[in-house]
Image: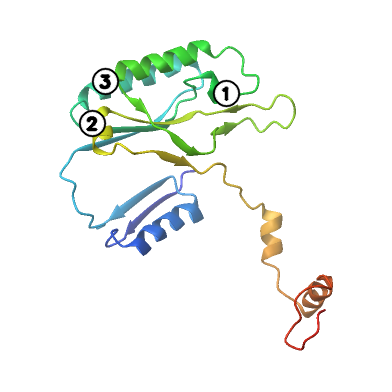
């Protein structure tokens, strides 16, 4: 299921509106957001932003390289940014764990970068962006997400970088229900008598 929201925000220059949009995306785990009347001043520039996903199959992923190659020729004189999960790494340092033979996929990804003359941006935060969720010796970490820009974009913002927030942990239903339980006097008493003896004294001068 895809979560979509459309909001007549009536101005996005204000900091509180920007924070509200971020909170909205996080709270409802939105995949697509449409903003109306955001009243942001025009940059008077043409900007292209491409969001890409590379197939897990090497052969199918070639179609993505071809499409992005065509876009690169159209965006040569404009600002162009490509953000995506490419399901491929650029270097062996972007892999931790047993991953099999990834050389072909890695070579194709690097060839694509050279052909389109895109530039990989430095990432702050987590080193890897994907994990196979295995807890044994088969644990595998990879950096599959990249942010790429053309030279026009880099000329305009030479110090640009991006930040990976890492994995978001979701509260399971059992924990959620526990947080929503009504507070009773017996639970308050239990909490008070559960505190350590060296805690700060209460208003009456005594600890629990």
Q: Is residue 120 above or below residue 198?
A: above
Q: Which mark is residue 152?
A: 2
Pointer 2: residues within 10 angstroms few (<14), some, or many (20+)? Answer: some
Instruction: Report if the CB atoms under discs 2 and 1 are less than 8 Å apart.
Output: no
Give x and y (percent) for residue 99. Answer: 61, 18
Left or right of 93, for residue 120:
left
The percent position of residue 181, horizontal first and vertical second, equals: 70, 68
Crowding around mark 3 (Cα neighbors within 10 Å: few <14, some 14 to 19, many 20+) is few
Residue 138: quadrant of the picture: top right
Q: Residue at x 22, y 21 (%)?
A: 73
**Residue at the location (21% across, 25% down)?**
76
In the picture of the structure, the residue carrying the numbered disc 1 is 95
> Is label 2 in a helix, a strand or a loop?
helix
Which of the two labelled residues, at mark 2 and mark 1, occupies the earlier sequence position?
Answer: 1
Q: Nearer the viewer, residue 54 or 18?
A: 18
Q: Residue at x 36, y 17 (%)?
A: 112
Left or right: where 37 falls relative to 66: left
Whether pointer 3 and pointer 2 mark residues with C-beta atoms closer than 8 Å, the reply is no
**Given this view, does label 3 or label 2 mark the residue nearer the observer?**
2
Could you say where residue 143 lies in the image, as x and y percent from the top left? 52, 29
Disc ID at residue 70: 3
Q: Percent from the top left, x then y, of residue 123?
A: 45, 35
Q: Is residue 51 above or below residue 182?
A: above
Is 139 left or right of 77, judged from the image as shown? right
Task: Give the CA separation, mark 2 to mark 1.
Answer: 30 Å
Question: Which mark identifies residue 29?
Answer: none
Q: Looking at the image, tell me whether mark 3 or mark 1 is earlier in sequence order.
A: 3
């Amino acid at each position: 299921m895809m979560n979509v929201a459309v909001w007549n925000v009536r101005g996005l220059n204000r900091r509180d509106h920007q924070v509200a949009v971020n909170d909205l995306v996080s709270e409802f785990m939105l995949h697509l957001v449409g903003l109306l009347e955001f009243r942001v001043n025009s940059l008077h520039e043409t900007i292209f932003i491409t969001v890409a996903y590379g197939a897990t199959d090497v052969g199918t992923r070639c179609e993505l390289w071809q499409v992005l190659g065509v876009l690169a020729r159209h965006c040569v004189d404009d600002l162009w940014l490509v953000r995506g999960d490419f399901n491929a790494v650029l270097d062996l340092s972007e892999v931790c764990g047993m991953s099999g033979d990834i050389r072909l996929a890695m070579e194709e990804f690097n060839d694509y970068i050279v052909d389109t003359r895109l530039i990989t941006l430095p990432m702050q935060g987590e080193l890897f962006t994907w994990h196979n969720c295995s807890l044994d010796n088969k644990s595998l970490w990879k950096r599959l997400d990249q942010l790429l820009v053309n030279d026009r974009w880099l000329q305009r913002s030479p110090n640009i970088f991006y930040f990976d927030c890492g994995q978001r942990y979701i509260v399971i239903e059992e924990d959620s229900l526990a947080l929503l339980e009504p507070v009773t006097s017996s639970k308050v008493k239990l909490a008070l008598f559960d505190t350590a003896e060296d805690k700060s004294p209460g208003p009456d001068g005594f600890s629990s």
